[in-house]
Amino acid sequence: MLMLMILILQKKYSKLLLDSDSNSKRILRYGHNEQDQPAFTQPQMYEIINKQKPVFQLYDQQLRKNGVITDDFASTEIKKLNNSLETAYKNIQKETFDKVHWVPKPWEKIQQVTKWGKVKDTGVALKDLLELNGKVNHLPAELTVHPQVKRIYEQRKQSIEQGKGIDFGTAEALAFGTLLHEGFSIRLSGQDCERGTFSQRHAVLNDQKKDIKYYPLRNQIPAGGSNRFEVYNSPLSEYGVLGFEYGYSQSNPNVLTIWEGQFGDFANGCQIMIDNFITSGESKWNVPSGLVMMLPHGLDGQGPEHSSGRMERFLQLMDDDPNIVFQMKEQRIKRQILDSNFQVCVCSNPSNYFHSLRRQLRRDFRKPLILFNSKRLLKFSKATSDISLFLEGTRFHRLIPDTHEEIKAPKEIQKFIMTFYRKDKTLKEMMLPSLEQNNQHLFAYDHFRIVAQQYENAEFVFCQEEHQNSGAWQYLEPRIQNVLSLLHQQSKIKHQYLTFCGRRPSASTASGSPTVHKQELDKLLNILFQ
């Protein structure tokens, strides 16, 4: 700014305003930190600098010497500047912060939902889902599609028509398509995200004979609509790409902005963005974001670099008090999401995944969403949903109780096991609810308390596949324990202490040996179900 002023005045008065002597003087006399003592490391240099007059005084003398300004003019301007600074300082003491005055224009126009019920009701009318199915899963005859991809689209179409067997890839396409139908835009970037790392998405189809890309979901954009569906395969530069998407989400609140890691483990390449911006930006600068981070997660025997999105790191960044359960009032429960800095979700079924994406834009506010989706469940035959769970009046479930028809009555249950993923076997004496949303104010204190108190004779166990120093255990343990202690004090349950079942602590997120992985898993399950 100083040099710009000098150049403007020099051009205006056609006089040399700065000689080489004053040009060489440092503007900052004390280096990087004005409170620092640079003589500790540069004693000789700063002995010289301390003898020099400040640049402002040198520049003032230069202007007077060259006849650009007079002594009276300089004195008047200096006094005027000092007075303006003093006035500004006094006025700022009287200022009060009003969030409304600092809302950027795009955020003043957060699109209000008008279709399919209330904000929380993220379900969609059946006729609209069937119409979407016809548009999106019907591939043009002139497009030469890979046989495997063609079969995936045929299966998607069939599952929606039959109303059962809807998998994660289909649920995601339904979420994207319905949001586009409502006028929102979708932006997805990440490594191999066009097809999905695990070949589960195929949002962009490549003609097998021509250099043509086809975007089926763009058929869902209403005629004349200005909203867009964009998918970008990004380079292996997580830090830069995630930083860009975070900024994009701030400027475009009506766009579902998503960054997907090829594996959840790759989030460690963008830790600065996560720590300094995504999880704390709203708290520090009142700058909200609706960014979605998809981190494929799960110990499936693929080794320590392809198993964990480091859920524990995100949960450690939550800004909550684990004793909130003792203060839970109806009003506080309603404000849970508003009081949080972001959300962490582990969806055990496709319908909940569908709702988690749609509610990001159905709300009249924005919060970052971190999704730890299981790699194995993406194509697991039993991890599917019926279409009834996508229809109007349905919404995201923070806790999903075990409702198997053969399970015993609550008072007869011996063990109450909390986990993230649903079981694939019937256990009549055990209750296995799935914790879908496990963070901070968003831990389902209210729902969990209602469910847990029904099992008055059961022992309570938290089970995770991650090691004890990883995953959600260290975060959830005090919160679950507080609920159990409260219920025990009220004589509603017999056992008040929570037990951990999982792998032992480890510096590595997973074993590099598939054999060891299988042995660890078998041991864990044997202990859990004994």
Image: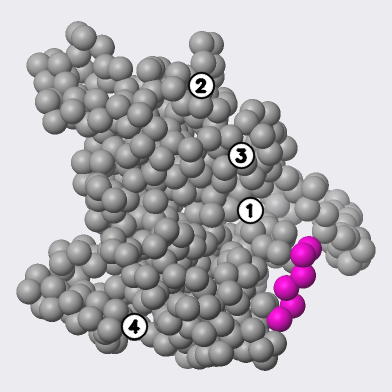
Among numbered discs 3 and 1, the one appearing first in the sequence: 1
Among numbered discs 1 and 2, the one appearing first in the sequence: 2
Q: Quadrant of the C terminus?
A: bottom left
Question: Which residue corresponds to the image point at 62% horizontal and 31% vertical from the top-left?
Answer: 116
| Residue 64 percent location from the top left of the image | 74, 54
- Helix or strand or loop: what does disc 3 sit on? loop
The residue pinned by badge 4 equals: 501
Label 2 vs label 4: CA separation? 45 Å
Front disc: 3 or 1: 3
Q: Residues within 10 Å of mark 2 (few under 14, many from 20)?
A: few
The front one of 458 and 211 is 458
Q: Residues within 10 Å of mark 4 (few under 14, many from 20)?
A: many
Label 1 vs label 2: CA separation? 38 Å
Tell me the tag on residue 127: 2
Tell me the tag on residue 528: none
Question: Which residue corresponds to the image point at 82% horizontal and 58% vertical from the top-left?
Answer: 97
Label 3 vs label 2: CA separation? 14 Å
The answer to whether residue 96 is left or right of residue 241 is: right
Among numbered discs 2 and 4, the one appearing first in the sequence: 2
Question: Which residue corresponds to the image point at 55% horizontal and 28% vertical from the top-left?
Answer: 125
Residue 440 colored in magenta in the image: no
Amino acid of disc 1: Val
Instruction: Write down the region rendered in magenta.
Output: 326-331
Residue 327 colored in magenta in the image: yes
Q: Quadrant of residue 212?
A: top left
The front one of 261 and 323 is 323
Front disc: 4 or 1: 4
Q: Residues within 10 Å of mark 3 (few under 14, many from 20)?
A: some
Q: Quadrant of residue 188?
A: top left
The residue pinned by badge 1 equals: 287
